[in-house]
Structures are given as structure tokens and as C-alpha cells.
């Protein structure tokens, strides 16, 4: 049995045990991985889960609600990848550690975008206010969302004396804009043709620029 067939079988099994919402979310997440936000369609998710289309509306009011749930999966995975980068950092003096943490956050962001372009694009496909940046359903294992991990790293720069307090306000938006812009160029822009070595080189240079520019 192939991987997709096994996933559909597991989803149907979940449904029979009363967890249709999870089954639909798993199928929709897989659709997003393969085709981005455009591929997340209620009718296709129910078909893959082996249930009637109307069954989905007991758990998701409409496609937008389903898409929002898939976005949360993407953000959680993004935060998890960023946390994994942070966990690999060695000990050091406060300034070195603070700078390394900022770079790890950015490196994890780029790594996830390249590894999961469909789900990464989906995560940012639903317009939302910044209030969503702290939603618990979008946090990683450590309890922080990607935006909160970035904020924490920037606060660490201030505490280590690397970033002046007066330059701290709004620093999230500057760092985020730079790294997100590169991520999009790498996954659907002219830089998508770069090989792994050149992609890492460009990513590290960008992180140098963010570190020095703040």
C-alpha cells in the first residue's frame, strides 16, 4: 500500500472512531503540502477521507475555516523547525549566544520554507491581524509561535547589550520582512533554481545583513 493510500486509510479509520475533524485536517494538510493553499478544498478533503461532502460542515463552517486550521498546522511546524535550530546552539558568552539565537530563528524559517513550500505558502495565505501571532494553536512544542520566537531572540539581543533599547521597537517587522522575502524568492521566485550550497550561502549572507543592520 502506498503512502497516500495508507494516509487515506488512517483518515477513514479516524472517522469511524468519531474523529472526522482530525481526518479532514490531515487530508487538507497533505493537499496543502502538495499544492499550496489553492489545493485546500472541502470537497476534495472529504473525498479523500471517504465521507460525504456535507459531513465536513459539522466541523468547519466553510473552506475558509478549514484553511485557517491548515494554516495553524503550518505555523506549528514552522515554530518546531525554528526550535530545533535553537536547540542545537552551543554554550557561549551572552553576546555570542544572543546573536546565534537570532540567526537560528532565521535559519529555521528559511529551512522550513524550502522543505515545505506548499504548507509554508498556505500558512501565510489567510489574512489575519497581528493578534494571530500569539495563537496557542500556532505554537511549537515550547509554547511559542514563530513570531514570538523572533521577538524573544530580539529581546535577547537587547539584554546582551547588542541591540540598543531605542532600536528595539519594530525590529520584528524588519527582520521578518527580510527573511520572508528571501524565503519567497527561494520557493517561488527566480532564486528557486539555486542549488543547496548557494541557497545556504545566500541565506547566511542575509542573516549577516539582518544582524548587522539592526
Image (cartoon, helix red, strand yellow):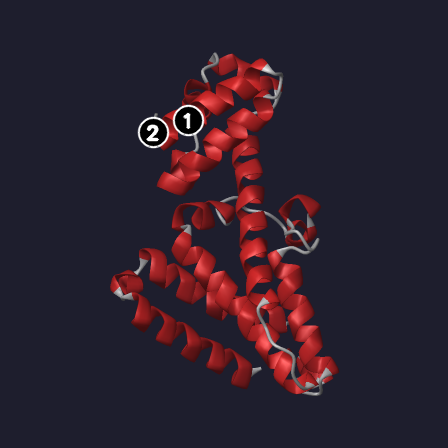
Q: Which mark is residue 31?
A: none
Q: Nearer the viewer, residue 191 or 132?
A: 191
Label 2: state its secondary structure.
Answer: loop
Drawn side of residue 190 relative to residue 15, left or right: left
Drawn side of residue 211 relative to residue 185, left or right: right
Taking the spot 65% from the left edge, 83% from the top edge, the residue there is 92
Q: On the image, numbered disc 2 is attached to which residue?
A: 2
Tell me if residue 153 comes above or below residue 56 in the rendering: below
Measured as percent of width and height from the top left, residue 47 is found at 41, 18
Residue 36 visible in the picture? no
Quadrant housing the N terminus? top left
Q: Residues within 10 Å of mark 2 (few under 14, many from 20)?
A: few
Q: Residues within 10 Å of mark 1 (few under 14, many from 20)?
A: few
Drawn side of residue 106 relative to residue 17, left or right: left
Q: Tags 2 and 1 in contact by the CB under 8 Å rule?
A: yes
Measured as percent of width and height from the top left, residue 50 is found at 45, 15
Quarter assignment of residue 168: bottom right
Measured as percent of width and height from the top left, residue 129 is found at 63, 50
Tell me if residue 114 comes above or below residue 198 in the rendering: above
Taking the spot 60% from the left edge, 60% from the top edge, the residue there is 83
Tell me if residue 209 comes above or below residue 36 in the rendering: below
Label 1: state its secondary structure.
Answer: helix
Q: Nearer the viewer, residue 60 or 88?
A: 88
Q: On the image, numbered disc 1 is attached to which residue?
A: 6
Taking the spot 29% from the left edge, 61% from the top edge, the residue there is 192
Quarter assignment of residue 71: top right
Taking the spot 67% from the left edge, 80% from the top edge, the residue there is 157
Q: Nearer the viewer, residue 20 or 90?
A: 90
Q: CA distance from mark 2 to mark 1?
A: 6 Å
Amino acid at each position: 500500500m502506498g503512502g497516500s493510500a495508507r494516509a487515506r486509510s488512517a483518515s477513514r479509520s479516524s472517522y469511524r472512531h468519531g474523529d472526522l475533524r482530525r481526518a479532514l485536517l490531515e487530508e487538507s494538510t497533505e493537499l496543502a503540502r502538495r499544492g499550496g493553499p489553492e489545493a485546500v478544498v472541502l470537497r476534495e478533503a472529504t473525498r479523500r477521507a471517504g465521507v460525504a461532502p456535507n459531513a465536513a460542515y459539522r466541523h468547519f463552517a466553510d473552506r475558509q475555516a478549514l484553511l485557517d486550521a491548515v494554516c495553524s498546522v503550518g505555523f506549528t511546524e514552522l515554530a518546531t523547525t525554528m526550535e530545533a535550530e535553537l536547540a542545537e546552539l552551543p554554550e557561549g558568552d551572552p553576546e555570542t549566544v544572543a546573536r546565534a539565537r537570532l540567526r537560528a530563528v532565521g535559519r529555521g524559517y528559511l529551512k522550513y520554507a524550502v522543505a515545505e513550500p506548499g504548507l509554508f505558502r498556505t500558512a501565510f495565505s489567510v489574512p489575519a491581524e497581528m493578534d494571530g501571532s500569539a495563537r496557542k494553536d500556532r505554537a511549537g512544542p515550547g509554547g511559542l509561535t514563530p513570531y514570538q520566537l523572533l521577538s524573544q531572540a530580539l529581546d535577547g539581543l537587547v539584554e546582551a547589550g547588542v541591540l540598543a533599547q531605542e532600536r528595539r521597537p519594530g525590529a520584528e517587522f524588519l527582520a521578518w520582512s527580510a527573511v520572508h522575502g528571501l524565503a519567497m524568492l527561494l520557493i517561488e521566485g527566480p532564486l528557486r533554481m539555486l542549488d543547496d550550497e548557494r541557497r545556504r550561502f545566500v541565506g547566511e549572507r542575509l542573516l549577516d545583513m539582518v544582524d548587522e543592520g539592526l
